Image (cartoon, rainbow, N blue to C red):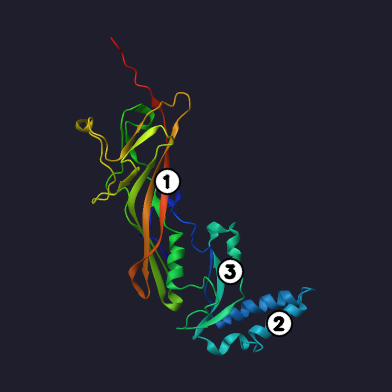
């Protein structure tokens, strides 16, 4: 179902993107799962368990009537072999503790090949639902921004340059597909800028809004060199108070990612909610000692 060859690194090398709104990808969904013969095997096991439950006799009768007795299905749809699938519910293993996975608890249902799933089946896979599921699997590079002076060598009123090298952040994508019904969707995240949060009100941001746009070459900000020491950084900050009495400031660098999808029946990109990914750095800021003669 998943093609993550253009995704970011997993494990400790990357992290999940967080939507900037209260929207979130579906934690569960419905998708094709069984041919009629396999579904019959499963259904009979379920029926057998019901029959041997003292409280399950009536349920067992209703269950078999529904899937085999013609109300509404006949003989587990065995006469439709090769013409469709029984659909089942699935959920994201990484969100097993999310109560929303119980949104997908409807009983098995049949969908003929070439027909859309019933409109009342929320989260039944469509290209759009696949795109939303792929959103949840995007992994963003975890590389941290470079600081000059470094985090352990900050000085009051001394501008700090912040940048991310070319190629540090690049588009990542995940493709989700359901070959059984011939649909797919590719969700792509592209970095568009960096927001700096100094961890204290006693700081000035460069630029003033703290948002550094991505450069044409894929870098963010400008690397510091000695010949630029008299210039304000195009992306950075200046701390105005030391951390001697407060402990380190938590500098947060938040990269915003523009996310869109294309897929079956949708060749032009469609926007999904933007996402963000944060890295934090503890910064010690010292007073600059001067001698007055």
Marks 1 and 2: CB-CB under 8 Å? no
Q: Residue at x 42, y 72 (%)?
A: 127
Looking at the image, residue 162 lies above or below residue 81: above
Q: Residue at x 27, y 40 (%)?
A: 234
The quarter in which the N terminus is drawn is bottom left
Residue 101: image x %, image y %? Answer: 58, 63
Estimate the spatial distance between the alpha carbons at disc 1 and disc 2, rounded to whole Å: 52 Å
Q: Which residue is mark 3?
A: 104
Q: Which residue is mark 2?
A: 62
Could you tell me residue 133's position as x and y percent?
A: 46, 64
For residue 182, which numbered disc appears in the image?
none
Q: Residue furthest top?
A: 293
* Callout 2 crowding tier (Cα within 10 Å): few <14, some 14–19, many ≥20: some
Question: What whole-number distance in Å separates the C-alpha atoms at marks 3 and 2?
Answer: 21 Å
Residue at 45% across, 30% down:
248
Q: Which mark is residue 278?
A: 1
Residue 48 higher or lower than 191, as above or below:
below
- For the C terminus, the image quarter is top left
Callouts 1 and 3 close, C-beta under 8 Å: no
- Give the mark nearest the N terminus, 3 or 2: 2
Pick out the residue farthest to the left.
227
| Of marks 1 and 2, the one in the foreground | 1
Q: Is residue 30 left or right of residue 220?
A: right
């Amino acid at each position: 179902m998943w093609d993550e060859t253009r995704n970011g690194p997993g494990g400790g090398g990357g992290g999940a993107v967080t939507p900037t709104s209260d929207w979130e990808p579906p934690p569960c969904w419905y998708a094709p799962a069984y041919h009629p013969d396999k579904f019959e095997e499963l259904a009979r096991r379920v029926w057998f368990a019901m029959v041997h439950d003292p409280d399950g006799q009536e349920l067992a009768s209703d269950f078999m009537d529904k899937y085999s007795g013609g109300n509404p299905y006949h003989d587990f749809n065995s006469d439709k072999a090769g013409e469709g699938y029984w659909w089942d519910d699935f959920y994201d293993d990484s969100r097993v503790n999310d109560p929303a996975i119980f949104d997908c608890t409807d009983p098995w249902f049949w969908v003929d090949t070439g027909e859309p799933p019933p409109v009342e089946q929320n989260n039944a896979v469509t290209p759009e639902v696949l795109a939303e599921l792929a959103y949840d699997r995007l992994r963003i590079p975890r590389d941290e921004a470079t600081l000059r002076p470094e985090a352990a060598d900050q000085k009051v009123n001394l501008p700090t340059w912040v940048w991310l090298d070319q190629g540090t952040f690049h588009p990542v994508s995940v493709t989700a597909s359901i070959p059984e019904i011939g649909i797919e969707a590719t969700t792509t995240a592209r970095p568009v800028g960096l927001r700096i949060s100094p961890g204290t009100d006693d700081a000035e941001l460069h630029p003033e809004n703290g948002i550094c746009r991505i450069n044409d070459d894929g870098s963010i900000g400008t690397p510091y060199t000695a010949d630029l020491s008299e210039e304000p950084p195009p992306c950075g900050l200046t701390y105005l108070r030391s951390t001697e009495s407060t402990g380190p400031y938590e500098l947060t660098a938040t990269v915003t990612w523009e996310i869109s999808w294309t897929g079956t029946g949708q060749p032009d990109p469609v926007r999904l909610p933007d996402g963000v990914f944060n890295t934090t750095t503890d910064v010690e800021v010292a007073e600059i000692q001067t001698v007055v003669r």
